[in-house]
């Protein structure tokens, strides 16, 4: 597992140009200055394991750039991706605050920059800065509501094709780019990882994507997926 100090770089959060756009990081200058004194900034290549499900919490990671997948596994070895974390998210906050083992594993899916804060330092930071405490609570609340939406979405979906259609539509809303060919989504996940997000097999995902393409609802060019018939996908979603 990479050390949180690997590839450490100098980077001040107070100088971040997109800080105001991030739910957790959008804090006053004094609070951000205090954050700078307790965090360690590191660059992580794709596939870096940040922490493992069941591991005692060492602290939190703040995702500055890149993305990470959060996964949970059964005793039989089946893996489910519960979330794709985006820039600005704090990873491992629940476990760190409760001082209980991490409930998921976190792994980068593209080159990423993260800030690591040791558990003791993070708890002191929250205790001394109510603003940071409120922003953490807001992010944990958003995490809860997101989990509820996912449970409703996947739990009430009748078929695997409906789950996949809903996933593509969700991605189009969160990170889609409108082009002349349709809504472009940059897909960094493998078919196996997509299967882990909707609780099915890699073969089923491959078959369904081919079917969507045959029906001219999507088109795939390398790592880019274009939704060419959004209404067609929406018609597949019943809830």
Image: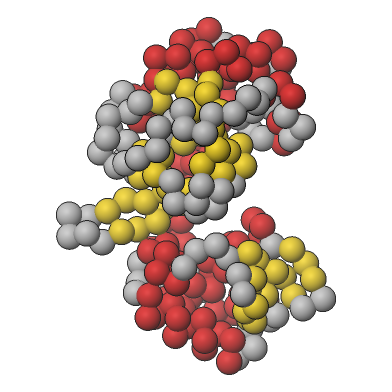
The quarter of the displayed image where residue 30 is located: top right
Q: Is residue 63 visible?
A: no
For this orientation, the residue located farthest to the front is 7
For this orientation, the residue located farthest to the bottom is 214
Q: Residue at 55% across / 38% down in the picture?
A: 43
The quarter of the displayed image where residue 28 is located: top right
Q: 148 or 86: nearer the eye?
A: 86
> Residue 24: percent from the left, percent from the top?
60, 29
Q: 46 or 57: nearer the eye?
A: 46
For this orientation, the residue located farthest to the top is 128
> Residue 118: percent from the left, percent from the top?
42, 20
Q: Is residue 28 visible?
A: yes
For this orientation, the residue located farthest to the left is 75
Give the vertical position of 13 relative to 21 (above or below). above
Q: Residue at 53% across / 21% down in the picture?
A: 39
Colouring method of the image: secondary structure
Q: 64 or 28: nearer the eye?
A: 64
Q: How many marks?
A: 0
Give the vertical position of 58 relative to 218 (above or below). above
Q: Residue at 66% across / 35% down in the picture?
A: 22
> Residue 55: percent from the left, percent from the top?
27, 35
Give the vertical position of 54 relative to 76 (above or below). above
> Residue 239: percent from the left, percent from the top?
51, 68
Q: Residue at 64% across / 81% down in the picture?
A: 219
């Amino acid at each position: 597992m990479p050390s949180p100090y690997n590839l450490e770089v100098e980077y001040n959060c107070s100088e971040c140009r997109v800080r105001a756009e991030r739910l957790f990081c959008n804090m006053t200058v004094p609070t951000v200055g205090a954050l700078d004194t307790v965090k360690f900034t590191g660059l992580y290549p794709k596939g870096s394991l940040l922490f493992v499900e069941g591991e005692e919490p060492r602290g939190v990671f703040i995702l500055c750039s890149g993305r990470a997948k959060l996964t949970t596994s059964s005793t039989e070895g089946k893996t489910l991706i519960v979330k794709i974390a985006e820039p600005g998210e704090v990873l491992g906050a629940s476990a760190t605050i409760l001082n209980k083992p991490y409930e998921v594993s976190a792994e980068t899916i593209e080159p990423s920059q993260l800030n690591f804060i040791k558990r003791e330092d993070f708890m002191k930071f929250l205790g001394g800065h109510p603003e940071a405490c409120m922003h953490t609570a807001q992010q944990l609340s958003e995490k809860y509501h997101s989990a509820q939406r996912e449970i409703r979405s996947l739990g009430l979906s009748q078929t695997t094709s409906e789950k996949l259609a809903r996933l593509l539509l969700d991605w189009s809303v969160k990170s889609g780019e409108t082009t002349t060919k349709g809504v472009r989504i940059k897909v960094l996940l493998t078919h196996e990882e997509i299967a882990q997000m909707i609780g099915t097999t890699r073969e089923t995902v491959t078959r369904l994507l081919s079917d969507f393409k045959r029906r001219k609802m999507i088109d795939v060019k390398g790592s880019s997926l274009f939704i060419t018939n959004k209404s067609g996908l929406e018609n597949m979603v019943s809830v």
